């Protein structure tokens, strides 16, 4: 049986992009859930004034701090300056509602960020130099205040009304014992690398609403349950060929204890018949959780056995442990039967080779969905392998949605994200792998590229070393240099991103002594007043010093 077609997976890109915003708001603030769960446990142990104080602290974490930070993170997606406006905007919804405004904070944060970004793009070219800070602060206050009012009058009633319908539907599913049916849909979506967006974007906010009433929620277990992954990897450990068995053995502990579920997804994608196994395993676990009325008192991320059991109320431990064991066992049995009936897929190494071009690379980036778990692990493994062979090159990891387009970088992605990586980084070299533990498979390709760098003629290298840095000088008039300082910051950031060696400084136009090899930056009015075009050989006239487009053209020209 063939592996899942890449174009079929690519059709889900739009859905990933939509829910990725929700994940970006939840994931940076997961530590609050950990603190909240810990303080809730301590609150139940102690008594007296300390019990009352901790109870209030726990409430404030969920009702006040978390919504503000979620809205802040949502607005920050569009613009760092918009983040404070996002924090302001959600306050009204917090005040008028008796429920934690998690969904509301997501919605209003994105709305605030979008409005700020649109207004800033329209207004920035019209701002005169020196007024940027004043007008930015005015924009933050005005937009935050207006959206706050909009949240009280419009957004909060709509969000709360919608949540009431969703909550009723979830409770109806629980009452009708239909949550296992939901797992039949949830498990395939997880394997298609939608696990983070489903957990943090959908199940976590709904679970938080349930926790306020019941003290725990089964929804926290539906995506985080490690049982199906343990079952799949155990089946490969016992029934697959030696190479896959060794890989599965190494992945098993990482998935169960480390909680990185993405590590078992490629094993399923290699033989899509195993989708049936994870569906059966997930539904089995959810059925047991529901039968024992089990749940967790806080969200878990990553879905490690250690973290799951740490967030399980003592009265729920039996049901949670039994549900995980039975889901793993059901998945294992189904996977064993299916592995014996299906043929292994062919190696995709030749396809990877075709993706390589003859450009030298000076950095390697691992890109996965969240940019935190599996990509970080892959980067660490490769860095250790290369270091052992005396090869030192910058290796980092990021979210596929934050991937930058650089010509001299090598991007390593999972096959499911290959089309998205090619869209985000058109000029980069891309290697698509089934999972990041396959270091031995793509290590020869990387070493080949690095060898090309080291085998360049020595004379060429010496010329590159001796090549002087390009100097860029911002000109200012009188003592007005605020815009120039901001422009220098933007240019240096772009130079760092594109790995261009620039020396950036500023000087007063009145004290200018032109140098032949220096690039000078000035606005049109300054150029006319001081007749700079007649004095300076390399002069770049820009409309506004806070102009990313002009600096981007300069950086690319130097590169």
Image (cartoon, helix red, strand yellow):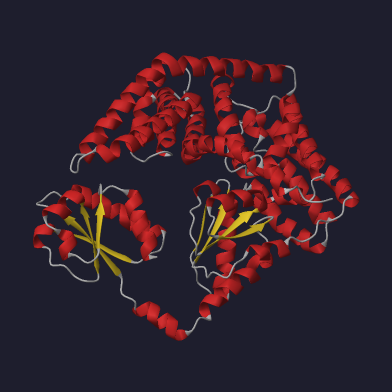
Q: Is residue 313 visible?
A: yes
Report the front residue among 102 and 307: 102
Residue 226 percent across, percent down from the top left: 69, 42
Report the front residue among 374 and 21: 21
Circle count: 0
In screen coordinates, is 126 left or right of 216? Answer: left
Q: Is residue 49 above or below residue 322?
A: above
Residue 242 percent across, percent down from the top left: 81, 63
Q: Quadrant of residue 359?
A: bottom right
Q: Is residue 379 above or below residue 111?
A: below
User: Which residue is at 71% across, 52% downward?
Assistant: 252
Looking at the rendering, in which quadrant would you find the C terminus? bottom left
Q: Is residue 283 above or below residue 157?
A: below
Report the front residue among 178 and 41: 178
Residue 477 percent across, percent down from the top left: 12, 52
Question: Residue most toward the front?
Answer: 534
User: Which residue is at 56% across, 35% downward?
Assistant: 19
Q: Is residue 67 visible?
A: no
In screen coordinates, is 227 left or right of 15? Answer: right
In screen coordinates, is 426 left or right of 92? Answer: right
Q: Is residue 444 above or below residue 472?
A: below
Residue 408 percent across, percent down from the top left: 50, 65
In screen coordinates, is 204 left or right of 475? Answer: right
Q: Quadrant of residue 376?
A: bottom right
Question: Residue most toward the right?
Answer: 341
């Amino acid at each position: 049986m063939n592996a899942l077609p890449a174009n079929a997976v690519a059709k889900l890109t739009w859905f990933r992009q939509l829910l990725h915003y929700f994940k970006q708001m939840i994931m940076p603030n997961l530590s609050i859930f950990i603190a909240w769960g810990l303080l809730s446990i301590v609150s139940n142990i102690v008594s007296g004034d300390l019990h009352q104080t901790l109870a209030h602290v726990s409430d404030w974490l969920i009702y006040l701090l978390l919504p503000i930070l979620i809205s802040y993170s949502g607005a920050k997606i569009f613009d760092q300056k918009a983040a404070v406006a996002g924090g302001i905007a959600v306050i009204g919804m917090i005040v008028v509602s008796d429920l934690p405004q998690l969904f509301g904070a997501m919605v209003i944060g994105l709305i605030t960020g979008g409005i700020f970004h649109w207004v800033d793009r329209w207004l920035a070219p019209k701002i005169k130099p020196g007024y940027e800070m004043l007008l930015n602060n005015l924009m933050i206050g005005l937009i935050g205040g207006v959206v706050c009012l909009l949240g009280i009058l419009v957004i909060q009633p709509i969000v709360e009304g919608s949540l009431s319908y969703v909550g009723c539907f979830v409770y109806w599913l629980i009452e009708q014992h239909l949550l296992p049916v939901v797992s039949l849909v949830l498990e395939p979506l997880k394997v298609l690398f939608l696990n983070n967006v489903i957990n943090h974007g959908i199940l976590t906010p709904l679970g938080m609403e349930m926790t306020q009433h019941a003290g725990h929620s089964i929804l926290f277990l539906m995506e985080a349950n490690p049982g199906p992954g343990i079952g799949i990897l155990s089946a490969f450990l016992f029934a697959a060929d030696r190479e896959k068995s060794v890989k599965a053995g190494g992945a098993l502990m990482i998935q169960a204890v480390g909680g990185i579920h993405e590590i078992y997804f490629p094993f399923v994608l290699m033989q899509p018949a195993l989708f049936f196994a994870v569906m059966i395993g997930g539904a089995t676990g959810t059925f047991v959780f529901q039968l024992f009325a089990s749940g967790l008192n806080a969200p878990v991320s990553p879905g490690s056995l250690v973290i799951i059991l740490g967030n399980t109320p003592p009265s729920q431990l039996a049901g949670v442990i039994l549900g995980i064991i039975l889901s793993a066992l059901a998945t294992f049995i189904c996977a064993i039967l299916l592995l014996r009936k299906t043929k292994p897929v062919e190696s995709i190494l030749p396809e990877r080779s075709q993706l390589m071009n003859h450009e030298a690379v000076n950095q390697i980036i691992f890109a996965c969905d969240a940019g935190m778990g599996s990509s970080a692990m892959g980067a660490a493994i490769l860095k250790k392998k290369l270091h052992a062979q005396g090869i030192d090159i910058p290796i980092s990891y990021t979210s596929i949605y934050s991937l930058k387009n650089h010509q001299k970088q090598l991007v390593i992605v999972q096959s499911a994200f290959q089309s998205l990586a090619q869209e985000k980084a058109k000029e980069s070299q891309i290697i698509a792998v089934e999972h990041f533990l396959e270091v031995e498979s793509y290590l020869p390709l990387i070493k080949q590229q690095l060898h090309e760098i080291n085998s360049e003629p020595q004379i060429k290298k010496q010329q590159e070393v001796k090549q002087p840095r390009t100097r860029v000088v911002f000109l200012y008039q009188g003592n007005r240099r605020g815009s120039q300082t901001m422009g220098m910051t933007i240019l240096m950031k772009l130079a760092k991103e594109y790995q261009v060696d620039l020396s950036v400084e500023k000087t007063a136009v009145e004290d200018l002594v032109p140098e032949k090899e220096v690039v000078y930056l000035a606005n049109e009015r300054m150029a006319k007043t001081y007749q700079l075009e007649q004095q300076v050989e390399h002069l770049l006239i820009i409309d506004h010093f806070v102009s990313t487009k002009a600096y981007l053209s300069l950086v690319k020209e130097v590169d």
